[in-house]
Image (cartoon, helix red, strand yellow):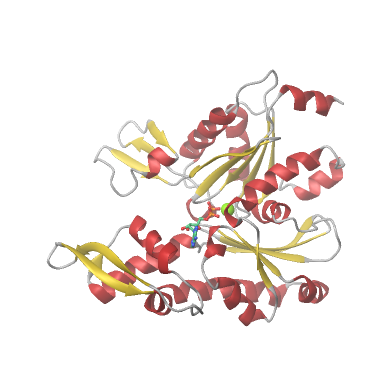
Amino acid sequence: MIGNLFGFLSNDIGIDLGTANTLVFVKDRGIVLREPSVVARYKTSKKVCAVGSDAKKMLGRTPGTIEALRPMKDGVIADFEISEAMLRYFIEKVDKRKLVPPRVVIAVPSGITAVEKRAVKDSAIRAGAREVLLLGEPMAASIGAGLPIHEEYANMIVDIGGGTTEVAIISISGVSFQRSIRVGGDELDEAIIAYMKKAYGLLIGERTAEEIKFNVGSAAPIVNGEISMDVRGRDATAGLPVTKHITSQEIREEALKEVVTQIVDLVKNALDRCQPEHSADLIDRGIVLAGGGALIRGLDQVISDATGLTVIQAEDPLCCVANGTGKFLDLLGTLTRDQVDRLVTQ
Ligand code: ADP
Ligand code: MG
């Protein structure tokens, strides 16, 4: 009853605090905000001057007095102050203040420490939350992907974000195994930058590298035929702008392969170490991929070939974690305290 009353008086919020993107879900409304997890601040005064999309535009081309930073880089909180500034900005942006402050569910990378969790909670409280619950990212992704988390059968989720890849086995509303590596979509971009320099003497920035990944990136041969594109950058020796023509095959084989192998190895490692009963369940259940990295062409195929298991891409991988926080907000009213304690990360 009290819960219903609060629901009527406040907007409960779910936040996916990702290394690349932050998404905000407002209960009964859905995802209302999606912006890059970037903060720009003045170098000397450390005063924040832009957050989200406005700050991302400054990455790599900031005037000398401003620096653009990613507070969640590598799946740990790189800087408490700028993470708080970012969280506050996003909460205030969506919280059209009703009578009661919102309850906030935040999905955090599972690798963050107790001190970092405390800092996230405190930041959200200072930003106006009345209560903060933290969900491990793999749990949030599993709920978002619609996996039957309450069943005793095991399910495996692999969430490939910008700075991290997390693998977890979920059963009976809990995480029974999890591992993460500080490798994700960002490393694919870095590998492309390194390849373009080595193969063509062409210097490109992060944004061009990401564009190459979107347009011609792949983990397995493209069955309908390999594709190609023109890439503009600066010639490393002459210093002049030039255009080079590249193919999906070379990007896959020469640039992306190593990072893709690390992701595949993480999954194989998890299968190797999980409980035998869970292994058996996964033969029926397969593996679900979430996060922006799940969108790389052919990654599902490569993981399937390496493990012999069925691999499915979650619906809308980029929104999976945020949708999970939203579904969790809906579930809260129906769960016992004990069930909530199992699901959240303390
Ligand atoms: P995080 O949870 O860490 O914020 P996301 O799940 O939002 O990360 O995924 C961001 C990553 O996904 C970035 O590295 C981005 O380049 C990559 N990405 C997004 N869309 C695609 C796509 N269509 N193909 C390949 N990579 C993609
Ligand atoms: Mg994520």
| Residue at 39 percent of width and 38 percent of height | 54
Quadrant of the rendering where the C terminus is positioned: top right
Q: In this view, does 50 lie to the left or right of 321?
A: left
| Residue at 50 percent of width and 32 percent of height | 89
Quadrant of the rendering where the N terminus is positioned: top right
Residue 57 at x, y percent in the picture: 35, 44
Q: Is residue 241 left or right of residue 301?
A: left
The image quadrant that residue 309 belongs to is: bottom right
Q: Residue furthest front?
A: 224
| Residue at 81 percent of width and 76 percent of height | 280
Does residue 284 show up? yes
Q: Is residue 215 left or right of residue 309?
A: left
Tell how many labels: 0
Q: Which residue lies furthest to the left in this view?
A: 238
Q: Which residue lies furthest to the top in this view?
A: 99
Residue 230 at x, y percent in the picture: 29, 67
Residue 317 at x, y percent in the picture: 60, 57
The one nearer the camera, 62 or 113, is 62
| Residue at 51 percent of width and 48 percent of height | 21
Residue 275 at x, y percent in the picture: 78, 72
* Residue 210 in the image: above or below residue 307: above
Does residue 181 show up? no
* Residue 155 in the image: above or below residue 67: below
The image quadrant that residue 32 belongs to is: top right
The image quadrant that residue 126 belongs to is: top right
The one nearer the camera, 259 or 148, is 148
